[in-house]
Image (cartoon, helix red, strand yellow):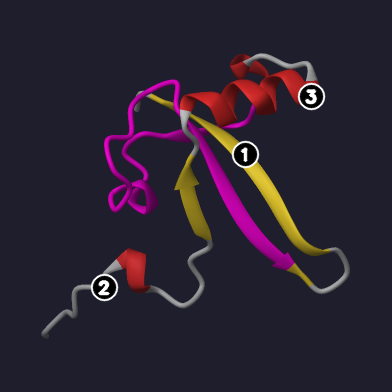
């Protein structure tokens, strides 16, 4: 049986992920008056992060989703080692 290798970054159901720079990260935390430890997390070894440049623990990832009721919605995750 031949298995086909799937490139996760090219999958049609993959949501857009992008790494926030330091200024944007600080602005986000200040806007919501939270710390990084209060954000949901995403593992550094998550396959979706492979295509992003220089992702390290503590970075904040913005995820863009399209909702039929709310339109475009942004979610944020902090990268943890794992």
Label 3 close to label 1 by CB (< 8 Å): no
- Residue at the image position 46 percent from the left and 78 percent from the top: 12
In this picture, residue 16 sits left or right of residue 81 = right
Q: Nearer the viewer, mark 2 or mark 1?
A: 1
**In this picture, is 60 found above or below 5?**
above
Give the total of numbered labels: 3
* Marks 2/1: CA–CA distance: 26 Å
Q: Nearer the viewer, mark 2 or mark 3?
A: 3
| Residue at mark 2 | 6
Q: For the N terminus, which image quadrant?
A: bottom left
**In this picture, is 6 found above or below 43?**
below
> Quarter of the image holding residue 40?
top right
As helix, strand or loop, the secondary structure at mark 3 comes to helix
Q: For the C terminus, which image quadrant?
A: top left
Q: Residue furthest bottom?
A: 1
* Marks 3/1: CA–CA distance: 12 Å
- Residue at the image position 69 percent from the left and 50 percent from the top: 74
Label 2 close to label 3 by CB (< 8 Å): no
Please give the range of residues in magenta.
39-66
- Lower position in the chain sequence, tag 3 or tag 1: 3
Q: Is residue 49 magenta?
A: yes
Residue 59, percent across and down? 45, 27
> Quarter of the image holding residue 71?
bottom right
Label 2 close to label 1 by CB (< 8 Å): no
Residue 63, percent across and down? 58, 50
**In this picture, is 73 found above or below 38?**
below
| Residue at mark 1 | 76
- Residue at the image position 48 percent from the left and 52 percent from the top: 17
| Residue at mark 3 | 32
Q: Assess disc 3: are there few (<14), some (14-19) or many (≥20) residues with their C-alpha within 10 Å of its C-alpha.
A: few
**In this picture, is 11 found above or below 35?**
below
């Amino acid at each position: 049986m031949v298995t086909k290798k799937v490139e996760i970054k090219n999958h049609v159901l993959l949501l857009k992920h992008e790494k926030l720079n330091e200024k944007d990260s600080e602005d986000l935390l200040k806007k919501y008056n939270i710390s990084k430890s209060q954000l949901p997390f995403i593992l550094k070894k998550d396959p979706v992060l492979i295509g992003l440049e220089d992702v390290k623990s503590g970075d904040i990832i913005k995820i863009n989703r399209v909702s039929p009721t709310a339109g475009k919605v942004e979610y944020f995750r902090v990268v943890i080692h794992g």
